[in-house]
Image: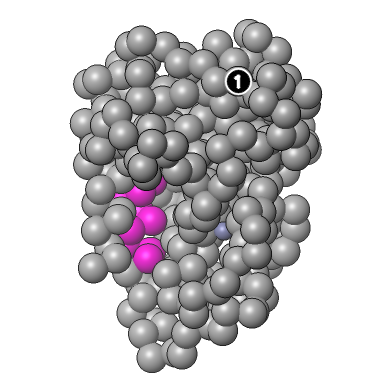
Amino acid sequence: MILSQWDRRIRRATELTSTYPFGAEGLRFYARVATFQKSLYAEIQKALADTPKISADRPLRDELDLFLLLPHFSPFLSVIKQIAPVPLAQAAVQLAEKGPAGWQQAIEDFWHGDPELTAAEDISGPAEAGDSHDANFSDRLLAWIFLQPYAEYLADHREIAIVDGTPSTCPLCGGKPIVGVLRSEGDGGKKSLICMLCAHEWAFRRIYCPACGEEREPQMAFYSAPEIAHVRVDVCDTCHVYLKSIDLTKTGLAVPVVDELATIPLDLWAREHGYEKLQINLLGT
Ligand SMILES: [Zn+2]
Ligand SMILES: [Zn+2]
């Protein structure tokens, strides 16, 4: 049952609240976001139960069922108003005021636009009223959170595609990787990446920069902290971009997207050392 993937994330976020107090506030927010996403996924599943699987050669983002999605957008904004840090809650109020035409615009802009969020702004910091750049960033962040369950449903109900090579962006939807995963396989271990939008996981090379394509070993390094031994920071010294990887050989209990959110000290460390994150997460970190 696919709904259980949401339950695993919610459970892990709740667990990590006590393990990593520095991430507790963000994790509590995430657990409530994921609870909403789980119910939206269930609605989508119910509505699309009788539709055929999407063919493997069709880009996932050719789909966009606004008739299905739009009625859920206003309830989503109401939830965000109640649970989000102040700046994001304010952005939800402003977006709610724009009405259905504005909501559709926000959804379409994100879905059909660049599949990334690059403005690394702190959503827990003070909001500057009237700053249109901030508003645009927040609208994209809201659309991203809202569209994840839909994208994930499409990825889960799609014919299996044969992927050539090891692309640096999601072979299904073109999204950037949000986190890497290491699993044991013989002696070497196996690396894969998880998509920011549809949560698809695809195989990746162990020594290769997903931002610039660097593959010379001396340029690629990873760092970890003893107190968070199962999460490491993979950095590229050519383009100065980093991405976290969750080492499931060290703890099988980890849920990569949640452990990524929880380990804020590693982001602070990376930024202090001049590295920029490949893809910010939905806490804006
Ligand atoms: Zn994807
Ligand atoms: Zn690079």
**Secondary element at tag 1:** strand
Q: Is residue 34 magenta?
A: yes
Q: Mark 1 points at which residue?
A: 221
Does residue 41 lie above or below 23 as drawn?
Answer: below
Which residue is more in the foreground, 61 or 218? 218
Q: Residue at x 32, y 69 (%)?
A: 42
Does residue 264 lie above or below 67 as drawn?
Answer: above
Q: Residue at x 56, y 47 (%)?
A: 204
Q: Which colour scheme is used?
A: one colour
Does residue 4 lie above or below 184 as drawn?
Answer: below
Stretch of the chain drawn in magenta: 33-41
Which residue is more in the foreground, 231 or 284? 231
Residue 277, percent across and down? Answer: 64, 28
Residue farthest toward the front in the current orientation of the protein: 187
Residue 224, percent across and down? Answer: 45, 16
The secondary structure that dominates the magenta segment is helix
Q: CB of residue at label 1: within 8 Å of ligand 2? A: no
Residue 37, percent across and down? Answer: 38, 56
User: Quick check: can you spot residue 139?
Assistant: no
Q: Which residue is drawn at 75% across and 34% down?
A: 214
Q: In this view, does 182 lie to the left or right of 73?
A: left
Q: Residue at x 23, y 68 (%)?
A: 1
Three-letter code, disc 1: Ala
